[in-house]
Each structure stands twice: as C-alpha cells, then as structure tokens.
Image: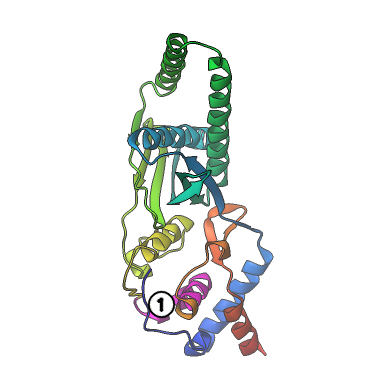
Amino acid sequence: MAEFNQQHQNVLQQFNADTINIFRGEQAEITSARWRQLEELRYPMLKNDEARRSRLLQELLVSVDDACRGEGYTRFAALSKLDQIRLDGQDTFVLTLVSHHARFISCLRRTASDRVRQLSELQDKLAGLDENAKLVEIVKVNTEHKKKLSDTWRDWQLRGSLTLSNNITPFEIIYDSDNKLVSVSPLEIKSLDPRDYPEHLNTTSELLQWVGTLFNSSIAVLGDIMWTAKNYSIAKLFACLLDTHTVDLDSIRIAVNDKERWDYNYGQLDEELLYLST
C-alpha cells in the first residue's frame, strides 16, 4: 500500500467560493440519488493451480455471457484478491471478486453454485462404483461439459487471462456480441493522478482500476490536489485517503440507474461543507 507525506487539513477551505457552490449542488444531487454498494463474491478454490484457474476463467466467460447477452458491446472493470486460508486442517484458497456490475456477480455466483451442485451429484453417482466404472463416469461428465462449452462458444473468440494475487488487483471484461468476442484480462497498474485516466476517474470502471493501482503502489503521487475541485466525489475520496492512508471499498457506492456513476461516502468532508454553508 502506498505511503503518503500529505495530510488533509480543511480541504474545502483551499477552494474558492465558486467551487464550494458547485460542491453544494453536487452534494444535493448525491443526497437525492439512490445508491447501492459494490457487489462481492467469495469464490472457493481448493488449489491455486492451472486446472482451477482454467475452470475459473471458463465460469467467468459463461457468467459474462449470461449477464451481458443482448447488450451489444459492454466493457467494465472488477477487482480480485486471492487469500490462502486454513480450513479443516488443510490449506485452501478463497478468491474475492468485486464489481459494480451486479448482474455479472449474480450470474457468477449462480454458475459457481451450479458447479458445486453438479459435483455433489457426481459424488453421489460415483458412490458404490468400482474404480473402472468411476473413471468411465468421470470421462463421460468431462466430455459432456466440453461439448456444451464448444456448442455455446462456437464461432466466438475467447480471450482469458487473470492475475491471481494476495493484493487487490484490477481486471477488465469486454463483451462484444457484434464481433463475437469475450475477453477477461488484467488492467494496467497506472498512476494515482486522475489526469492519467481518459475519463479522469469519472467512471466506476476507472475508479476500480485506480483502487487496484493504489493497493499495488509503494509511493503515492496524487498530482495537484486542487484538481479534485472538478468533482466532489473525487474530493471526498482523496480527503479520506490523505486522512486514513487507505480507501474503504464499503464506502464506494454506485448509482442504481447508472453503474458507471459512483460516489465515495466520507462524512467528514460533508461536515466541512455544511459548516462552510452556515
């Protein structure tokens, strides 16, 4: 996590009256809007090996198709973090996935649940069979699964690559039904300066890429802090970062009617704005 040599000291007092009035208007809009939190899924992985990573990518691709079918072209970001835990005396892994695309997370949760159910049904079917019969049944199930995937993705381009790390890591998903392309790939670790992002952190996808950069940076260079005068949500995010030296994913909220619109809930700056309004 990056280290900071700046501190937030009455940030709003550094801005002129016009900026304060703009912030008041933005805060009124934020208050009247409906918000939801980022969606999170904890995905169990018994091992962090090639077979499990391949299955994870397959399930990601299937879930993207379920979530985005009919949308034409969709591009959005997500975060991943792999933790090793001790369970029943054995080392195992849990992959945490976070995104503002609620339908995608919901579809992935259902896909993972279906896999667990199918494994349970297979174990029941294998019970009492001899080793040869078990092998025949497992080969049959695997063959049927591969055929189903082949039939589903015939003529599609599937591109999958995912970095699994114990750091919070950003990745990008692209679904392009016109060109029959589904892609899952790591996002670049950039800088913490909003000016280095095409939309200047005005989309949730860019914010998640920025968060991933924050958790993979040793030194924080935020750029000109006065640039935050352009966006009250960014001003709150940076004020919290300078005060606490971190960001809280639970404080990021997403507009119900627009998943690429975000806000950061930081009451201390709201209180300063209220004080300057009296």
Q: Position of residue 158 (x, y in %)?
A: 35, 32
- Mark 1 — residue? 227
Q: Residue at x 39, y 47 (%)?
A: 172
Q: Position of residue 228 (x, y in %)?
A: 44, 76
**Position of 211 relative to 154 (above/below):** below
- Residue type (three-letter) at the residue carrying disc 1: Trp
Q: Main secondary structure of the magenta part?
A: helix
Residue 74 quadrant: top left
Between residue 250 and residue 95, name the one nearer to us. 95
Residue 160 located left or right of residue 95: left
| Helix, strand or loop under label 1 | helix
Is residue 96 visible in the rendered structure shown here?
A: no
Residue 251 quadrant: bottom right
Q: Position of residue 4 (x, y in %)?
A: 37, 79
Q: Residue at x 45, y 79 (%)?
A: 242
Quadrant containing the N terminus is bottom left
Residue sticking out furthest to the front:
89
Q: Position of residue 133 (x, y in %)?
A: 46, 9
Q: Which region of the structure is painted magenta?
A: 223-241
**Position of 17 relative to 161 (above/below):** below
Q: Residue at x 47, y 31 (%)?
A: 62
